[in-house]
C-alpha cells in the first residue's frame, strides 16, 4: 500500500548559477568570461572555497565547494569575486515574492530554490509546464535572471527533472517514466545518499559507482539490514517514489559564519579567539531572534569536516549562554583527534 503514491504535481525551481549570474547582471561586461564567486584566490595561495561559478568556469572543471586555490590553478584568468551576500539575499526575497504571489503551497529550500505543490492549481502535466514557464518568465521580467524548473509527481523526481533542465530550461518527468529515468542514474541522486551510504551500497553490490538499477536488485529487507530504517525509504526512492510533503512556511532560518585559517593550526588560543569573533558576528546578525539551535563546524587539515549541534527548548537565553555551549561543542570536536584545523564555523537556527 505504501508504495502507491498519492497523485501530486510538484514543481521544483532553482536559479541558474545564482550568485555568479547576479554578478553578471550587475557587471554585464563579465558575461561570456569564466567567473568565480567565493574566497580571495590570492594568486593561488588563497584558502577558502568556491561558492559558485558560471557555466564558462565550469568548463574548466571549477565547482562549488572546491578549494579556491584549485579553482585558480584550473583557470587563473577567471574573474574572481567575493561573496556579496546582502545583495543575493535581497534578490532571493524578490524571487520568493514572485512565487508567493502565484502559489500558496511552497517550501523554501535555500536562497535560490523552492518546491511548489501545484496539485490543486492544475489538472495535468501539460498545464503544469505552462505554469512553470510563466513563473520562469516572471522571474526574468522582474529580476533579469534565468532559472530552471523541473516538474514531476514528487519532490525527488521534480528536483531530478530540474537538474536535467539546467540551464535556463524546463523539464517534465511523467510519473510513469520516473522509475526508468532514475534507474540509469548513480545512487547518489537519491536525497540522503552521501559518499558513506554510497560506499556501503557499492560494497554490497561489488561496484564502485553503483547505479540505481544495480541497487534495485536489493530487496527491501536487505536495504533495511544494511542501512536501518532509511533503507526502506531508499527502496521506494530507487523506484522513483518519494512521499515527503512540500512543507510550507518552514521558515527555519540559519545564520552562520565560517573562517578559514591562513595556515592550518592547533593553537587553541588562536582557534578560540577566531571562534569568538565569528560567534559575535552571528549574534549581531541574529539580533533579537530566538535561537533554536547552534551548530559548530570544524574542517581538519585533511578536509574531513565534522559538525556538532544542540537544539534548545522554547526558553530564551542570553548570548553568553549560547557562546559557552558553542565553546563546549568546539572543544568536543578539537579533542576528537590531533589533526590541525583548517576551518572553523558557527551557525544558529532561528
Ligand atoms: P546551487 O543552486 O546549488 O548552485 P547554482 O545556483 O550556483 O548553480 P546551478 O545552476 O547548478 O543551480 O546553489 C545556489 C547558491 O548557493 C550558489 O549560487 C552559491 C551558493 N552555494 C554556496 O555558497 N556553496 C555551495 O557549496 C553551494 C552548492 C552553493
Ligand atoms: Mg541554483
Ligand atoms: Mg539551489
Image (tube, helix red, strand yellow):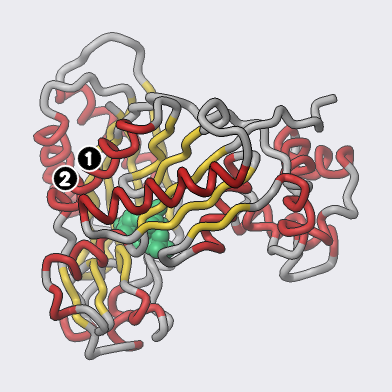
Across and down, in percent, residue 47 comes to 25, 71
Instruction: Please determine whether, in this image, residue 319 is positioned above or below residue 129.
Output: above
Quarter holding residue 304: bottom left
Q: Cα distance, mark 1 to mark 2?
A: 5 Å
Note whether ligand 1 is within 8 Å of mark 2: no
Does residue 78 appear to the left or right of 195 in the view shown?
left
Specify the quadrant that holds the C terminus.
Answer: top left
Is the C-beta separation of discs 1 and 2 under 8 Å?
A: yes
* Dot label at residue 93: 1
Q: Residue at x 79, y 57 (%)?
A: 180
Instruction: Work out whether residue 170 or residue 324 is closer to the camera in this orientation and state it.
Output: 170
Label 2: element kind: helix
> Is residue 340 at least partly visible in the picture?
no
Q: Residue at x 80, y 30 (%)?
A: 4
Does residue 6 appear to the left or right of 331 in the view shown?
right
Name of the residue lying farthest toward the top: 315
Across and down, in percent, residue 29 comes to 13, 80
Give the residue at mark 2: 90
Q: Residue at x 22, y 40 (%)?
A: 93
Amino acid at each position: 500500500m505504501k508504495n502507491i503514491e498519492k497523485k501530486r504535481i510538484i514543481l521544483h525551481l532553482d536559479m541558474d548559477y545564482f550568485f555568479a549570474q547576479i554578478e553578471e547582471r550587475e557587471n554585464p561586461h563579465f558575461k561570456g568570461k569564466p567567473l568565480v564567486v567565493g574566497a580571495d584566490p590570492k594568486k593561488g595561495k588563497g584558502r577558502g572555497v568556491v561558492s559558485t561559478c558560471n557555466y564558462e568556469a565550469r568548463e574548466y572543471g571549477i565547482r562549488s565547494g572546491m578549494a579556491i586555490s584549485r579553482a585558480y590553478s584550473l583557470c587563473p584568468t577567471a574573474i574572481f569575486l567575493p561573496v556579496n551576500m546582502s545583495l543575493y539575499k535581497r534578490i532571493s526575497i524578490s524571487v520568493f515574492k514572485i512565487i508567493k504571489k502565484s502559489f500558496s503551497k511552497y517550501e523554501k529550500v535555500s536562497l535560490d530554490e523552492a518546491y511548489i505543490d501545484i496539485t490543486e492549481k492544475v489538472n495535468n502535466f501539460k498545464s503544469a509546464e505552462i505554469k512553470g514557464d510563466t513563473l520562469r518568465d516572471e522571474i526574468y521580467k522582474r529580476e533579469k535572471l534565468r532559472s530552471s524548473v523541473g516538474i514531476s509527481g514528487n519532490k525527488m523526481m521534480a528536483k531530478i527533472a530540474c537538474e536535467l533542465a539546467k540551464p535556463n530550461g524546463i523539464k517534465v518527468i511523467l510519473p510513469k517514466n520516473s522509475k526508468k529515468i532514475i534507474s540509469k542514474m548513480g545512487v547518489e541522486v537519491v536525497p540522503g545518499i552521501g559518499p558513506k551510504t554510497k560506499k556501503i551500497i557499492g560494497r554490497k553490490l561489488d561496484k564502485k559507482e553503483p547505479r540505481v538499477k544495480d541497487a534495485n536488485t536489493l530487496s527491501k529487507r536487505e536495504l533495511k539490514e544494511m542501512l536501518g530504517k532509511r533503507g526502506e525509504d531508499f527502496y521506494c526512492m530507487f523506484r522513483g517514489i518519494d512521499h515527503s510533503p512540500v512543507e510550507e512556511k518552514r521558515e527555519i532560518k540559519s545564520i552562520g559564519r565560517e573562517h578559514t585559517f591562513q595556515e592550518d593550526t592547533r593553537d587553541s588560543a588562536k582557534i578560540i579567539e577566531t571562534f569568538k569573533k565569528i560567534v559575535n558576528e552571528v549574534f549581531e546578525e541574529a539580533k533579537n531572534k530566538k535561537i533554536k539551535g547552534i551548530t559548530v563546524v570544524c574542517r581538519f587539515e585533511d578536509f574531513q569536516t565534522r559538525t556538532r549541534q544542540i537544539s534548545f527548548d522554547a526558553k530564551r537565553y542570553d548570548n553568553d549562554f549560547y557562546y559557552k555551549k558553542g565553546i563546549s561543542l568546539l572543544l568536543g570536536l578539537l579533542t576528537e583527534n590531533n589533526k590541525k584545523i583548517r576551518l572553523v564555523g558557527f551557525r544558529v537556527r532561528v
